[in-house]
């Protein structure tokens, strides 16, 4: 066991966490003299003692096992172990990083769970689409509105005695337009003025008739 290396590592982690030797001994559940001897490399701690000290320092026990030489360092060390073994950041910063990391992992897991039913339903949708396409080819072609209206006009023409105007998809108008030419703007204006003058003359005549009748009486 690398006694000196693990002792100096525990001391460094305790100072980064701003913990006194007494507070760490209380958290780890070991005596103060025993913890002091471990930091100075005078005692060889057991795996259980290292686990208790790691819990008091808020780091993983695997980190202390690697420092003590009990475990070999893994090349594929996970992010949690790397964060907890980092000596350049404080324990509070480690907690923040770990919480952010866990939140990202949970969010990714939720997205994967939501995508799983969609990926299972995609082959079913494709099969339904292929069946619909096959059925569409076997059915009669869909007619447009113009074709349906033309067919309706043809049926009406057959029922009405075979009138060719009714049987045609574009029947000719049944009534011919009026042959009387439309008067021009000047003609319409002159007619309007003649009507107004005639109305004024009739009004004056009525007034004269009334006045003459009153004079006689």
Image: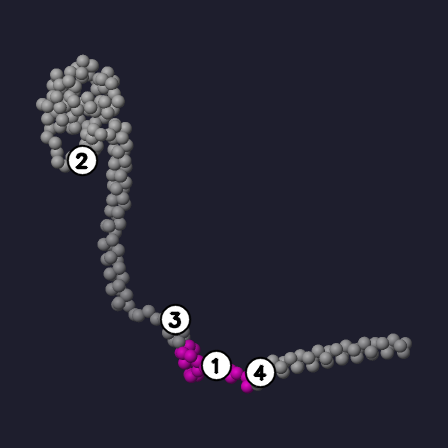
Dot 1 corresponds to which residue?
173
Tell me where residue 180 appears, x and y as whole percent: 57, 85
Q: Nearer the viewer, mark 2 or mark 4?
A: 2
Q: How far is disc 2 from disc 3 in space, using C-alphas?
A: 67 Å
Pick the front one: 148 or 110: 110
Contact, mark 2 vs mark 4 (Cβ under 8 Å): no
Which one is earlier in the sequence, the residue at label 2 or at label 3?
2
Q: Residues within 10 Å of mark 2 (few under 14, many from 20)?
A: few
Q: Is residue 191 magenta?
A: no
Q: Nearer the viewer, mark 1 or mark 2?
A: 2
Q: How far is disc 2 from disc 4 in space, using C-alphas?
A: 96 Å
Q: Nearer the viewer, mark 4 or mark 3?
A: 4
Q: Which residue is drawn at the image coordinates 90% and 78% (left, top)?
A: 216
- Give the total number of marks visible in the rendering: 4
Q: Is residue 88 above or below residue 132?
A: above
* Tag 1 secondary structure: loop
Tell me where residue 102 appears, x and y as whole percent: 25, 35
Q: In the shown orientation, is residue 89 left or right of residue 44?
A: right
Residue situated furthest left in the rendering: 1
Disc marking residue 182: 4
Dot 2 corresponds to which residue?
78
Dot 3 corresponds to which residue?
145
């Amino acid at each position: 066991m690398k006694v000196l290396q693990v002792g100096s590592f525990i001391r460094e982690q305790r100072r980064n966490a701003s913990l006194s030797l007494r507070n760490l001994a209380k958290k780890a559940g070991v005596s103060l003299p025993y913890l002091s001897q471990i930091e100075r490399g005078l005692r060889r701690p057991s795996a259980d003692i290292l686990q208790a000290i790691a819990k008091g320092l808020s780091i993983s026990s695997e980190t202390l096992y690697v420092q003590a030489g009990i475990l070999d360092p893994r090349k594929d060390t996970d992010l949690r172990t790397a964060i907890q073994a980092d000596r350049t950041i404080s324990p509070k910063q480690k907690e923040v990083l770990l919480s952010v990391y866990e939140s990202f992992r949970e969010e990714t897991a939720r997205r994967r769970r939501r995508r799983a039913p969609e990926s299972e339903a995609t082959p079913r949708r494709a099969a339904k689409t292929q069946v619909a396409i096959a059925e569409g080819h076997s059915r009669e072609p869909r007619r447009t509105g113009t074709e349906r209206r033309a067919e309706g006009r043809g049926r009406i023409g057959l029922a009405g005695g075979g009138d060719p105007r009714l049987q045609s998809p574009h029947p000719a108008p049944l009534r011919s337009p009026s042959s009387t030419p439309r008067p021009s703007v000047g003609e319409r204006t002159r007619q309007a003025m003649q009507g107004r003058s005639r109305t004024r003359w009739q009004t004056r005549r009525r007034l004269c008739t009334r006045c003459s009748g009153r004079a006689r009486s």
